[in-house]
Amino acid sequence: MAQDAISEALYERAQALIPGGVNSPVRSCRSVGASPFFVKRAAGCRLEDEDGHIYIDYVGSWGPMILGHAHPEVVEAVRFAATQGMSYGIPCRLEVALAEKVVSMVPSMDMVRMVNSGTEATMSAIRLARGYTGRPKIVKFDGCYHGHSDCLLVKGGSGLATLGIPGSPGVPPEVVAHTVSVPYNDVEAVEAVMKAHGDAVAAVIVEPVAGNMGTVLPKPDFLPALRRLCDTYGSVLIFDEVITGFRLAPGGAQERFGVRPDLTCLGKIIGGGLPVGAYGGRRDIMEKVAPVGDVYQAGTLSGNPLAMAAGLATLKVLSTPGIYASLEEKGAALEAGLREASRIAGVPVTVNRIGSMGTAFFTDSEVKDFAAALQADTAAYAQFFRHMRSCGVYLAPSQFESFFVSTAHTQEDLDRTAEAALESFRVVKEKCAKKMKV
Ligand SMILES: *Cc1c(COP(=O)(O)O)cnc(C)c1O
C-alpha cells in the first residue's frame, strides 16, 4: 500500500463532493504541487494523519491554536459547556465573561460584539464605520486579507495571493468601487488618497502586522501615520487583529506598537479553535450597533456557549505570566534555526518575524510590501514545503502565509525543525539551482 493511501482515497472522495476537495482553498496544497493529507487527530504541536504520519505543526489551524492542539484546559471547558446545552440564542453568562476578558486585554476596546468568523468581524466593522461616518469609501492595503466579504476582496493576500487571483468573479465592480487599495508601509500613498478623498473615507483598515502576504512588519512610522491621518480626516481606523490579537501580546499589535485604533477585529485565537470572531472599540462608535443604534448586524449562533467557553479558557491560559516572553523566545529560536540552515545550505532567504509568527521568503531582498513578497521564488518554496513535510514538519502550503509557533513547541521540536530545514534547503539548492539567481 502506498504511503499516503488513506489520505489519497479520502481526497478522491472529497473532490467529487466538495470543490477542490477542501472547504478553504489554500488547504488543497495546489500552489506547492502537493495533495493535502487528512488529519486524524492532533495534540500539542503534533498532527497525525490518516496514514499514521506525524508532523510538527506550524500552521496551527492558521493561527488559533496558540496553546497547541487539544489543550487540556480548553478541552475541559468545552466538554463541560456541551453538557449544559450547545446553543441557546438567549444571553448566557459566558458571553459576558468573554466580553469582559477581551475588553480587559485589548487596550482600545470599550465594547465588543461577538460574531462567528474573522470575515464577519471585518464585514461588520466596515458597515459600522460607514454607518457611523455616513461615508462610503474604505482604504485598505495591497496583500492584506480581511476575509472574503465582497468589498474587501481587492488585491487581497492569503488564498488570492497563493492562487494569483487579483479579485474575484462574483464581485460586481460597483461593489468595490468604494474600495481603494494602496501599498503596505507606503505613508505617502495613503496621504495622497486621503488628500484626494479623505472626506469620503469611512475607514482605513489594516493588518497592523500583515500575516496574509507572509509576515510583513509595519515600518516605525506607518501605524502612527494612519492614526494621524484618520484623526485629521475623521475616518475610523480599523485594526484587523484577527491574526495578531492575543498573538503578539495580550493586547495584540496595538499594545506592542502603542497605537490605538478606533475599532478592532478579532478572530482565530479568540475562539480557541471554535468559530468565533469579534469586533469592538470606542463606545460612541459601538453604540451605533443595533439594538442601541441603527447599524444592523446579527447572528443565530453568535455568542454560543461552546465557542465562548473555548475562547475564555484560551485567553485565561494566555494570561499566565511569562507566556508571551516564552513565545518570543521560541519564535526567535525558530528564526535563528531557519537563518542558519539557509546560510549553511547557501539558499538566500529573508526571514520576517515578530513574536511567534513569521515567514521565510525565498528572496534575498527586504520584504516590506506585497510587491516585494511577490518577488519570492514560489517554486523554491514549494520544493522546500514538500521536503519539510517529508521530514515531518508541516508548514503553510503557500509562500504567502505565516508560520505560527505555539506554547506546545519545545526546544527539541525547534531543533528538529532546524535540522529538517537544513536538509530541505539543500534539496532546494540542488533541484532549483538552475532557476535561482545564486
Ligand atoms: C483569517 C483572517 C480573516 C478571516 O477570518 P475567517 O475566520 O477566516 O473568516 C480576516 N482577517 C485576517 C487578518 C485574517 O488573518
Image (cartoon, grey):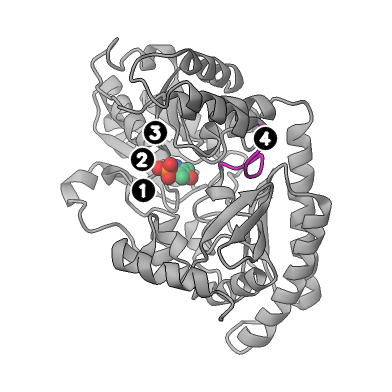
Q: Nearer the viewer, residue 301 or 407?
A: 301
> What residue range appears in magenta?
64-72
2 and 1 marks in contact (CB < 8 Å): yes
Q: Amino acid at mark 4?
A: Pro
Question: Going by the image, does 436 lie left or right of 411?
Answer: left
> Magenta: predominant secondary structure element?
loop
Considering the numbered disc 1 on the image, is that residue within a helix, a strand or a loop? Answer: strand
Q: Residue 255: percent from the left, percent from the top?
A: 63, 28
Residue at the far top in the pictured view:
292
User: Which callout, 2 or 4, points at the residue further toward the start of the chain?
Assistant: 4
Q: State the residue position of label 4.
A: 72
Element type where label 2 sits in the image: strand
Q: Nearer the viewer, residue 193 or 49?
A: 49
For marks 3 and 2, give the one nearer the viewer. 3
Question: Residue 116: which numbered mark, if any?
Answer: 3
Q: Secondary structure at mark 4?
A: helix
According to the picture, the residue beneath numbered tag 1 turns out to be 181
Residue 207 falls left or right of residue 324 = left
